């Protein structure tokens, strides 16, 4: 088979977009969760690549018959599991354009538009979310960059903190990382990968938030033991229960002790389009780095994670390496941003395109409308739970996340999760509290969800478990 000609691409591209539009339309009729048994997809696929090229029709036929049964429909209107991972029309089209242009935006010189659009849309987000103006690329000393995932951004922050501490002469083997026991697993993983040997996941208060006093005590204990406290990671909207750590109080401690303070707002960060929720993250002007995922709740498809540092110096110091083959006049002029120095990968996709498309498609008012609707629906679910004879909240809802349990105990709560997930029309995630108590999470934020879908979920939740 030869390369696909532009004419063939046009024809197959039209068919593919039609297929995707049909798929989107068909979502409400599909069962949210996959129906695959382990190995069942693999065994239908040949053991080796075909000797001769095949037609696009043959491939799409296999997509339908072999792959679709193994697809979890994250775009289904009944998606209340994990957190949303939205793939909306404008973001898919931005993704397509990025793939088609196929540029590598590793340096300004390898595609100036990729760098300059990214600098600009990251600054748009600063304004949209009410983040500190000093984080704007245009202004500095901070700056923003798109990373693949929140895990990568948190890892990057940990590497920078470690680099800064070792430049001050501290042995890496003595450095300590602190977070709450509710921090996302990417904190522990990132710290391990970054070479930290001491990771303290601290006990939380009744709302599952990190306690400043416990942090102070841990820092004092470690210092007394000859270790070197290095970095604290706060969560604004932790994954399990949506816990919100006291960012401002933690910032005062990190500032006093000279520690790096990174904030993980991977999910909740999108809600900051609504000024009335910004009280959840006070004191950002004392934070060293911050991440949130437009690829969760801001309607941009995966991957698109927004990462800011309050001062780019330490980041560039940790990440810059300039081999001879990347030297160019623009870099040497000092007038441009080379985003390869802002994270581990060299090559980088033109991800700002889809973010730009989404921000322009919805506008600020569209984003505020959809996100406030999700939060209002979550409040409605929480109100129903409060008056239900079968259910109770395990903690107050945070934004659009409601965590509940069955009053008959652990088995009944687990049975409820199973029952919702067997309906085919709704999916939720079960988890456990720090004391091992199971609970059920309702995470509202799928772009296709309507209030009727929330009501339908509620009708399943609100019936006695046999
Ligand atoms: C609070 C929090 N942090 C980090 C992550 C990891 O996100 P990513 O998949 O972008 O690494 C998640 C994912 O759900 C999360 O909820």
Image (cartoon, rainbow, N blue to C red):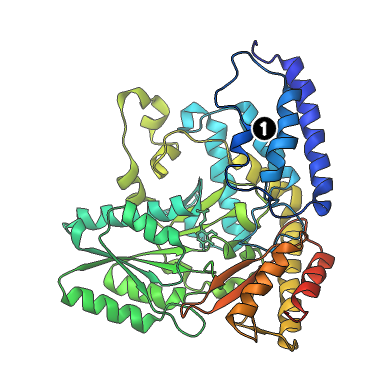
Disc 1 C-beta below 8 A from ligand 1: no
Instruction: State which quarter of the image contains the C terminus.
Output: bottom right
Q: Which residue is mark 1?
A: 97
In screen coordinates, is 135 left or right of 50? left
Taking depth in this image into account, of 441 and 64 the one nearest to the observer is: 64
Q: Secondary structure at mark 1?
A: helix
| Residue 397 seen in render | no
Occupied quadrant, residue 311: bottom left
Within 10 Å of the Cα at label 1, are there few (<14), some (14-19), or many (20+) other Cα atoms?
A: some
Q: Is residue 295 left or right of residue 25?
A: left
Image: 398 above or below 296: below
Quarter the N terminus occupies: top right
Horizontal side of 185 relative to 389 (left or right) equals left
Quarter of the rendering containing residue 443:
bottom right
* Furthest residue in direction top, as rendered: 2
Residue 283 at least partly seen: yes
Q: Nearer the viewer, residue 149 or 126?
A: 149
Is 14 left, or right, of 340 in this rendering? right
User: Which x, y percent locates residue 194?
Assistant: 31, 52
Instruction: Tell how many labels.
Output: 1
Give the x, y percent position of residue 420: 72, 67
Q: Residue at x 32, y 56 (%)?
A: 192
User: On screen, 133 above or below 104?
Assistant: below
Viewer-proximal residue among 332 and 125:
125
Instruction: Work out whether 414 lies above or below 360.
Output: below
Expressed as whole percent of the image width and height from the top left, the position of residue 127 reads 60, 58
Residue 270 location in percent, x, y? 62, 61
């Amino acid at each position: 088979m030869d390369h696909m000609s532009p004419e063939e691409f046009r024809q197959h591209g039209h068919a593919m977009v039609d297929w995707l539009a049909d798929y989107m339309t068909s979502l409400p009729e599909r069962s949210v969760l996959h129906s695959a048994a382990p190995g069942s997809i693999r065994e239908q696929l040949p053991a080796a690549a075909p000797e001769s090229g095949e037609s696009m029709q043959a491939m799409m036929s296999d997509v339908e018959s072999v792959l679709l049964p193994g697809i979890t429909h994250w775009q289904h209107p009944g998606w209340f599991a994990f957190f949303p991972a939205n793939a909306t029309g404008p973001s898919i089209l931005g993704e397509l354009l990025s793939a088609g242009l196929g540029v590598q935006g590793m340096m300004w010189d390898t595609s100036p538009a990729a760098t300059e659009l990214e600098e600009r849309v990251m600054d748009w987000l600063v304004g949209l979310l009410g983040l500190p103006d000093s984080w704007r690329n245009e202004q500095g000393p901070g700056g923003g960059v798109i990373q693949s995932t929140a895990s990568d951004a948190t890892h990057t922050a940990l590497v920078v903190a470690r680099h800064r501490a070792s430049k001050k002469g501290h042995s890496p083997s003595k450095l300590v990382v602190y977070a709450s026991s509710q921090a996302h697993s990417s904190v522990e993983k990132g710290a391990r990968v970054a070479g930290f040997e001491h990771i303290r996941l601290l006990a939380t208060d009744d709302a599952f938030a990190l306690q400043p006093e416990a942090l102070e005590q841990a820092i004092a204990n470690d210092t007394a033991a000859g270790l070197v406290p290095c970095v604290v990671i706060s969560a604004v909207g932790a994954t399990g229960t949506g816990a919100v750590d006291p960012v401002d109080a933690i910032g005062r401690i990190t500032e006093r002790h000279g520690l790096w303070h990174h904030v993980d707002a991977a999910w909740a960060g999108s809600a900051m389009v609504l000024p009335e929720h910004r009280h959840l993250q006070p004191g950002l002007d004392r934070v060293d780095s911050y991440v949130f995922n437009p690829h969760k709740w801001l309607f941009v498809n995966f991957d698109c994670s927004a990462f800011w540092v309050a001062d780019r110096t330490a980041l560039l110091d940790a990440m810059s390496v300039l081999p001879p083959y990347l030297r160019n006049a623009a870099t040497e002029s000092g007038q441009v941003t080379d985003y390869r120095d802002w994270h581990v990968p060299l090559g980088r996709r033109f991800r700002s395109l889809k973010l730009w498309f989404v921000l322009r498609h919805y506008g600020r008012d569209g984003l505020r409308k959809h996100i406030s609707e999700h939060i209002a629906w979550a409040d409605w679910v929480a109100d129903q739970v409060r008056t239900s004879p079968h259910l109770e909240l395990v903690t107050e809802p945070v934004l659009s996340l409601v965590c509940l349990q069955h009053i008959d105990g652990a088995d009944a709560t687990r049975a409820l999760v199973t029952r919702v997930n067997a309906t085919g029309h709704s999916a939720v995630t079960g988890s456990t509290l720090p004391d091992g108590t199971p609970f059920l999470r309702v995470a509202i934020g799928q772009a296709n969800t309507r209030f009727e879908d929330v009501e339908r979920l509620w009708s399943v939740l609100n019936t006695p478990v046999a």
